[in-house]
Image (spheres, rainbow, N blue to C red):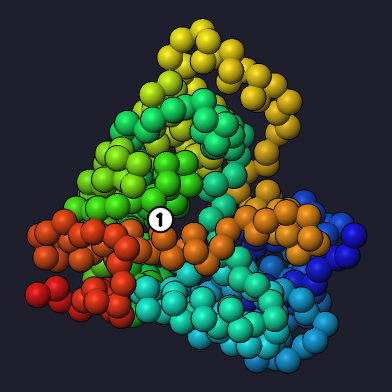
Amino acid sequence: MSIRTVAIVGCGIGRSHIVEGYLPHADKFKVVAICDLNEQRMASVGDEFGIERRTTSFAELLADETIDIIDICTPPGIHLEQVVAALAAGKHVVCEKPLTGSLAAVDTIMAAEKAAKGVLMPIFQYRYGDGIQKAKRIIDAGIAGKAYTASVETFWLRKPEYYAVPWRGKWATELGGVLVTHALHLHDMMMHLMGPAARVFGRVATRVNDIEVEDCASASLLMESGAFVSLSCTLGSQEQLSRLRLHFENVTFESSHEPYTPGKDPWKIIAANDDVQAKIDRVISDWQPVAPRFTTQMGQFHAFLSGHGPLPVTTVDARRALELVTAIYQSSDSGAEVPLPVGPDSPKYVDWRARTK
């Protein structure tokens, strides 16, 4: 099994990638370099994990032929240029969410990836954990039946000190608010289990903090399956929780309420009757524990690179999540329902800040 060399760019959330994603797979990955403009933070992370190579130069990492993977954990406003540059340099790329700040930019990245030697894996680590993966297996086995309705709640708390970080809360650098930076995870989880949306009506507002971007949002979705889904998000909840409740013909699923690990057990899996329960028991009878968050996503990434499985998260997944964001912004601005797919004819395709006429 070949060990893939990794350079971490951005030592904030990048530290979590090391702890949860790479250290548990020491036989598969080796973090050989870190990069950050904050040299004090870079030194702290380098000392903690014994990473000797430290640089403030992103270009230096791209020029190093011994580095296989560039893991981008920088502020969202520079993801586009860094992803495109890393792909052009022949690297495999891991990029934190949001992948970028518009559908036009996602399409630019997808075109760059198509022409590149390496692949891009966006981060959606909340897909992993025993709870969501059991639900996924049950749904994929056809046991759940017709999808009826779902509700998705991202009730988190972000106070002014969170936005004291200069790039946060601004369109130019954070690219969006609760829809882009926080609820994106749960909305991806919902579509991972229920499939894509067909029509979207949404509202956004800034009610909690003195920032440019939204910190409250709600939306009503008609899914391609015909199911109805309601989304509700705020950064002003005095009790933080993340919750998905999905109602199917034969099963109701409810996630754990842990705000930052909603994919983990305990999930409620409520069968319609004993026969359905027996089918569920059979399909998960050989269950093996699924480590949450980055641990499983990075493990599956290595399996893909070694030719032993699919890419766990793709640019298509990232585009679908950002298409939903775009539709909610467009609907909130226009007061009208937005059909999907959202393409270049949308006033929000190039820039979410553009006004809808």
Say left or right for 289 vs 138. Answer: right
Seen in the picture, residue 68 relative to 148 is either above or below; the reply is below
Does residue 55 lie above or below 247 as drawn?
A: below
Q: What residue is shown at x 68% (from left), y 38% (from top)?
A: 290
Can you give x and y, in whole percent of width and height, for residue 335 in the image? 10, 60
Mark 1 Cα-neighbour bin, 10 Å: few <14, some 14–19, many ≥20: many
In the rendered image, the vertical position of residue 154 relative to residue 82, given as above or below:
above
Q: Nearer the viewer, residue 114 or 207?
A: 114
Question: Of 25 and 169, which appears nearest the observer?
Answer: 25
Identify the image quadrant of the C terminus. Answer: bottom left
Nearer the observer, 272 or 23: 272
The reply to whether residue 77 is visible in this rendering is no
Residue at horizontal 44 percent and vertical 51 percent from the top: 188
Q: What is the quadrant of the N terminus in the image?
A: bottom right
Q: How many marks?
A: 1
* Image side of residue 131 versus residue 5, left or right: left
SS category of the residue bearing label 1: helix
* Residue 33 location (% of width, % of height): 75, 77
User: For this rendering, which residue is in front, 337 or 42?
Assistant: 337
Which residue is the site of mark 1?
Answer: 184
Measured from the top left, where is residue 150 in percent x and y? 33, 35
Residue name at image x 73 percent, y 32 percent: 288
The quarter of the displayed image where residue 28 is located: bottom right
Q: Quadrant of residue 67?
A: bottom right
Residue occupying image coordinates x 51% and y 76%: 110
The amino acid type of the residue labelled 1 equals: Leu
Work out whether 30 lies above or below 217. Answer: below
Where, by quadrant of the figure, is residue 130 drawn?
A: top right
